[in-house]
Image: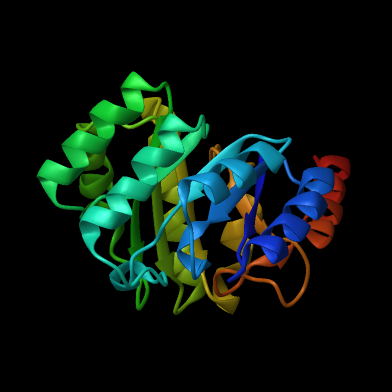
């Protein structure tokens, strides 16, 4: 699956992006931390506008997001997403354990699936450290694990490839790739290597993370890969 992030600071702009994403994405990620104002009515409206499965993400600043309010309010937003029938809720692994447990329980009650995520914005750890992290994250029993790191060399991409292979052998649903221009190959090859999904921008200039490839370009690349293999 190719997920397209929708990220804008006002509701009408988000809706305009959702309409475009509905036509090209397999799954839509709502980056709620970009919005300046977000009440229950607006959130319900956004989720209902999505004709594809929805990931709701409210990324805190420490994890590369833009959410500036309290952690309690952020968790409340994510709980509301589960209540309003979002398919997936993205939750950072380093979230306060008590808050994390409450959200897991609430999501299960409302049949929303948890993507448990960890980001490294400056480097890519060694493979053995990432495998240990993945095992630790899996103990919390999320539906999907997401581990993303910054590529500073092409060797970093290979680390993510090996991590994906280990996840596949273990039956773990994993999203894993590298950010940055050097990480481009890992974004493309993560799905052929067994990744649960990858991310592509709606169009050039609308990237929500460094190194995202526009979805039309990504689809052309995958079309070429199918011909090759």
Instruction: Using the image as rendered, state which of residue 183 and residue 88 is in the foreground.
Output: 88
- Left or right? Give the position of 107 relative to 44: left
x and y, in percent, of residue 3 in the image: 64, 48
Residue found at the very far left of the displayed protein: 98
Residue at x 86%, y 54% (from the top left corner): 220
Q: Quadrant of residue 106?
A: top left
Instruction: Using the image as rendered, state which of residue 23 and residue 167 is in the foreground.
Output: 23
- Left or right? Give the position of 47 relative to 159: right
Whether 31 is drawn above or below 225: the answer is below
Q: Quadrant of residue 228?
A: top right
Residue at x 69%, y 40% (from the top left corner): 50
Residue at x 64%, y 71% (from the top left corner): 207
Give the quadrant of the C terminus: top right
Residue 121 appears in the rendering: yes
x and y, in percent, of residue 102 in the image: 19, 35
Give the quadrant of the N terminus: top right
Residue 165 appears in the rendering: no
């Amino acid at each position: 699956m190719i997920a397209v992030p929708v990220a804008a600071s006002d509701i009408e702009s988000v809706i305009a992006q959702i309409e475009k994403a509905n036509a090209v994405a397999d799954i839509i990620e709502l980056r709620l931390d970009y919005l300046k104002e977000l009440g229950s009515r607006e959130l319900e409206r956004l989720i209902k506008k999505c004709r594809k499965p929805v990931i709701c993400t409210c990324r805190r600043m420490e994890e590369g997001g833009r959410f500036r309010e309290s952690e309690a309010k952020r968790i409340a937003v994510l709980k509301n997403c589960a209540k309003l029938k979002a398919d997936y809720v993205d939750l950072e692994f380093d979230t306060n354990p008590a808050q994390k447990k409450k959200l897991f329980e609430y999501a299960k009650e409302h049949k929303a699936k948890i993507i448990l995520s960890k980001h490294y914005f400056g480097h890519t750890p060694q493979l053995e450290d990432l495998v240990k992290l993945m095992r630790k994250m899996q103990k919390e029993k999320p539906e999907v694990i997401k581990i993303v790191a910054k590529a500073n060399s092409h060797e970093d991409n290979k680390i993510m490839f090996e991590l994906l292979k280990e996840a596949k052998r273990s039956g773990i649903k994993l999203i894993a790739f590298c950010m940055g221009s050097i990480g481009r190959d890992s974004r493309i090859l993560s799905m052929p290597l067994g990744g649960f999904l990858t991310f592509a921008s709606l169009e050039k200039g609308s990237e929500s993370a460094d190194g995202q490839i526009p979805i039309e370009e990504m689809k052309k690349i995958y079309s070429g890969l199918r011909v090759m293999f």
